[in-house]
Image: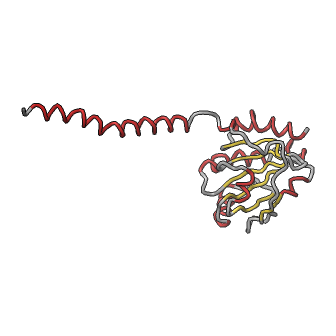
Amino acid sequence: MSEAPATAGKPRRWLTLLPLIAFLALAGLFLVRLYSGDPQRLPSPLIGKPAPAFTLPPLEGSGLAGFGDGDLRGGKVTLVNVFASWCGPCRDEHPVLLELSKNPELARAGVRLAGLAYKDEPGNSTKFLKEMGNPYALIGVDRSGRVGIDWGVYGVPETFVVKGDGTIAYKFIGPLSPEALRAVLMPQIEKALR
């Protein structure tokens, strides 16, 4: 009679591990799906449509004007880069933006770079740009993130190519690398210039 309780306990122990096994399997599946796929394939409902109406105040201490949707309809292509000082990938892409801002061909074509400081304290944004360099011709401060929501920002950094009539032509999600600039963004800028 002493053997019956020992065998009856084993199936119960197995059942108690079942929720843990199911949780780990589900967590593993979510993790794999989280890092699979190309973020550039995320659809943006704003492509081909006018930029949403907005007005952003300037970043104090930058010496540059803020901007709004009216500034994007001035006849020149504008790259709107969404950044934040607290964003690690923004720091990674910043040297690429500095090089982009110094591109003589883009300067001759009138292409400009506008920065949208997203959910950031202005003092932190100013410090970030003083440390890293300032590639922007215009900088607007979106402390609440409301403008970013209207633009469909998933996260920072993101870069939008806006045609001279204010139409959003392309959205690049994630940090720009030299390769992504050459292979993806430059062709989109050239297309917007036509």
**Who is closer to the viewer here, 21 or 93?**
21
Q: In the rendered image, which quarter contains the C terminus?
A: top right
Q: Residue at x 82, y 60 (%)?
A: 67
Q: Residue at x 64, y 49 (%)?
A: 155
Q: Horizontally, is 5 left or right of 166 in the view?
A: left
Is residue 34 shown above or below 143? Answer: above
Q: How is the image coloured?
A: secondary structure
Q: Residue at x 29, y 36 (%)?
A: 15
**Where does the image place residue 22, in percent across and percent down from the top left?**
40, 36
Is residue 134 shown above or below 189? Answer: below
Residue at the limit of the structure toward the left, as seen here: 1
Q: Quadrant of residue 117?
A: bottom right
**Who is closer to the viewer here, 50 or 99?**
50
Q: Horizontally, is 192 left or right of 28 in the view?
A: right
* Total residue callouts: 0
Q: Quadrant of residue 13?
A: top left
**Where does the image place residue 119, in percent across and percent down from the top left?**
65, 60
Q: Horizontally, is 135 left or right of 75 in the view?
A: left
**Who is closer to the viewer here, 26 or 73?**
26
Q: Quadrant of residue 3?
A: top left
**Where does the image place residue 95, in percent across and percent down from the top left?**
69, 47
**Who is closer to the viewer here, 180 or 70?**
70
Q: Horizontally, is 28 left or right of 4 in the view?
A: right
Is residue 139 shown above or below 182? Answer: below
Q: In the rendered image, which quarter contains the N terminus?
A: top left
**Where does the image place residue 12, in percent across and percent down from the top left?**
25, 36
